[in-house]
Each structure stands twice: as C-alpha cells, then as structure tokens.
Amino acid sequence: MTKQDHPLVHLAPETAAAIAAGRAVVALESTILTHGMPYPDNLAMARSVERIVRDGGAVPATVAVLDGRLRVGLADDELDTLARTRDALKLSRADLAFAMLQGRTGGTTVAATMIAARLAGVRVFATGGIGGVHRGAESSFDESADLSELARTDVVVVSAGAKAILDIPKTLERLESLGVPVVAFGTDVMPAFWSRTSPVPAPMRLDSPEEIARFAALRAELGLGGGMLVANPVPAEHEIPEAEMTEFIARSQSDAEAAGVAGKAVTPFLLERVLELTAGRSLTTNIALVEHNARLATRIAVAIAELAR
C-alpha cells in the first residue's frame, strides 16, 4: 500500500494524480478558514493561496475533515462550504479520529494537517503561524500539540514563526529539546508572525528553497525522523512593527485572563481581540503572510520534487 492509497485519506483527483506522478504538492491547513478569519475573507484567502501554489508549479491540497472524511485536497465548492461552517471543530492530534468517528466537520490545525500530509505522502505544508508555548505556561501548562507533532512527523512546515501571542523564546526552547530544526529564511532573527523581527536569534539560517530542500533530504538520509520548521518573515510592506504589536498583545492577553478564557479558546479569542485593537490591520497582515508562506512552500516543494527525480 502506497501512502496515497491509505484507506482513511480521501484525496482529491488532482492531488492523487500529482502525488502518483511525483509532482510538487503543498498541503494547506483549514483552521484558518474555520477559526482564523471571518467569512468571506477566509474564502478569498483560501482561493488566493491555492492560486499562488498553482502559479508556482505545485498542486495545492487543503486538508479538512468533512462529514467524518479526512480530505486532502478540496474542490472550490467544498472550500466555500467549509468557510461558511459555523460549528466546525478545531482538530488536532487528540481529536482528529473522534471527529471522523462522529461524522463531524472540522478544520485541521498544524498538527492534524501534518498527520494528514504524512499519510498522503505530501512533504511540504504552508501555514500562517504555528502554535507553541503560551505565555504563562509555567502555571497553565498550555502548550500546543504542534510542537510534539513537529518532532515526530516528517513534513517541512513553512510559517511566519510561532504566533506572536505566544512565548517565542520558550517555544524555541521546546523545539530544541524535541530535536526540531528551526530554519529562518534569509534572516538571522526569528520573525514574530505579524512582525518581521523579534528579540530572539534564529537557531539556523538558509537563504534559498534549494538549500532547504537539500537539508530536508540530508536529514532523511541520516534517518532523522520528524519535521522541520521554516520561519519566513512577513513582507516588509505588510508588517506591523514589533513595538506596536507588543502593546496590542499585552492588552489582548489581559482581556483573555479577565474573561477566564482557557484551552483551545485562547488562540481564537486573542486573534479576534488583536483584530479589534488593530482596526483590522492584523487581518490584512495575516492574509499577506499566509500568501507569502505559500509562495516559499511552493518553491521548496518544487525543489524537493526535482531532487527526487
């Protein structure tokens, strides 16, 4: 049984054909649609990102669970339906199988999308920002399953770093402990999602998609399991400077604590509050960075496909 023949993974015809032919495919998550942006901005963003991947010479494969079926690659009408769904679950490793068992619909987080990509044989995944260690985790123990998934699942994840609402230094410490390589693309410091820079030095730097593809191939040859995080700074013309964002995030965090928000509800609450405080600027930046990450992920996927020929 080849990976693309997994009985629980339902591939779109275009995705299946590309995987079988050894063409470049880029996985895309769906919690951006279900929990990250309001309709119709979420649908416009999803369509734009898929178009960017196609324009770059790869096949986009948005991942989601629709009525209990784990889908890798969605038709346009399915994207539209998912973008409008109000009661979609937010799915990670712990509840992916539960949603499938119950016949539910859900958006896949970084962790769940990585799982689906690995099962389908997709090597590269583009997202906005990964989850990580939340601020105050020393008392809340709130840490995203994205980090442990990166340690165990062989997928190259392209993001704008960890979401800036998180504790970036602690997130990098955990990734180091888990043996996950973190590569900043073309920069010596870690990006901070909406901002191009942070006070945190990048663990590694590479300056071309081809170098990243060769790095991933060498890790595979050495038998080093697990994924790789590529941190791609948002374009300068779309960033919100770190000094500004620090104030907005602090206010959002304070509001979340006052409201007693916890668990999976924290990230959506903080993102919505930041959206309000920035008068919509954070959404514009969010869309720009997702598109930017899709471009880089496509170039990496194409380079990996060429190495495999």
Image: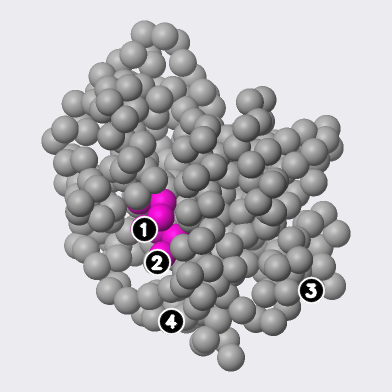
Residue 42 position in % (x across, y down): 50, 39
Judged from the image, the secondary structure of the residue bearing numbered disc 4 is: helix
**Quadrant where the image shows the C terminus:** bottom right
* Residue under the point 53% across and 68% down: 54
Vertical comparison of 50 with 46: above or below: below
**Residue 284: quadrant of the picture:** top left
Cα–Cα gap, marks 2 and 3:
27 Å
Badge number at residue 2: 3
Left or right, residue 249 beside residue 107: left
Judged from the image, the secondary structure of the residue bearing numbered disc 1 is: helix
Q: Are marks 1 and 3 in contact (CB under 8 Å)?
A: no
Between 11 and 186, which is closer to the camera in this rendering?
11
- Kind of residue indicated by mark 3: Thr
Precedes in sequence: disc 1 or disc 3: 3
Precedes in sequence: disc 4 or disc 3: 3
Instruction: Specify start and end residues of the magenta stretch as a single range.
Output: 289-295
Q: Are marks 1 and 2 in contact (CB under 8 Å)?
A: yes
Q: Which residue is mark 2?
A: 296
